[in-house]
Amino acid sequence: MLTAADLGSKHWALDRLSEPSAQGADPVCNPDAFGRIQPQRAQRAPVVLIEHFLELRYAENCGAAFGFMRDMPTMVRKGVFYVAALGAVVLLLWMFVTGRGGRLFAISVPLIVAGALGNFVDRVRLGYVVDFVRAHINDRWAYPTFNVADAWITIGVVLILIEGFLDGRQEKRAKAQAANVPAA
């Protein structure tokens, strides 16, 4: 259901926030002679949610988070992304099935797996990931454009970090208590 929400929102963004490009850039995500990557689709006018702060604007992400690795050769990029996505999904599912982690971990796994699968489907289907949520302050500062899958992954990772922090504090308390207990 989480992956479906992500893919549905990206389908909406493709339909509402972009249109076929007059240039028809090809091949996907490969830099031209000047080192620029031409978009596959043209942007339409953004949907403003909160004036000067939040809008929905079509973007194509050929890289990882924040466009990282977008300039790498296509085969390197695909290899890294596909292996990383598959590895993360398999590892998290294995940890989940074998009972690792606590309640926050159990909540985070479906979020991270759904986000990874949603972005993976985009990469296989389109060759890039559709991003469309843009947070900015009067166009002077802008957070990198993202999508629902990125939000799922971020929330999941934050939950894992919180659980790790809380577990660390509990472990520290238990060690302190054990050190203060006199031997019988």
Image: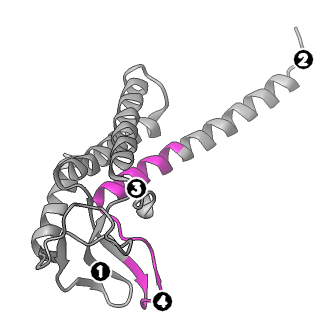
- In terms of secondary structure, where does tag 2 sit? loop
The one nearer the camera, 78 or 53, is: 78
Q: Which residue is mark 1?
A: 55
Which-is-in-front pick, marks 2 and 4?
4
Image mark for residue 140: 4
Residue 90, quarter of picture: top left
Mark pair 3, 1: CA separation: 21 Å
Camera-nearest residue between 95 and 37: 37
Comparing labels 3 and 2, the label whose residue is closer to the camera: 3
Quadrant in the picture for residue 134: bottom left
Amino acid, disc 3: Ala
Which of labels 1 and 4 is toward the front? Answer: 4
Give residue 123's position: percent from left, percent from top. Answer: 25, 51
Coordinates of residue 8 in the picture (x, y in percent): 14, 58
> Residue at image x 45%, y 59%?
68
Where is residue 64? Give x, y as percent.
Answer: 40, 56
**Residue shown at the point (18%, 70%) measured from the top left:** 25
Query: Which quadrant, please, contains the C terminus?
Result: top right
Q: Quadrant of residue 83?
A: top left
Q: Residues within 10 Å of mark 2 (few under 14, many from 20)?
A: few
Secondary structure type for disc 1:
strand
Q: Amino acid at mark 2?
A: Pro
Residue at disc 4, secondary structure: loop
Of the pair 159 and 57, the residue shown nearer to us: 57
Tell me: residue 65, above or below residue 103. below
The stretch in magenta equals 135-160
Q: Which residue is mark 3?
A: 64
Above or below: residue 28 compared with residue 141: above
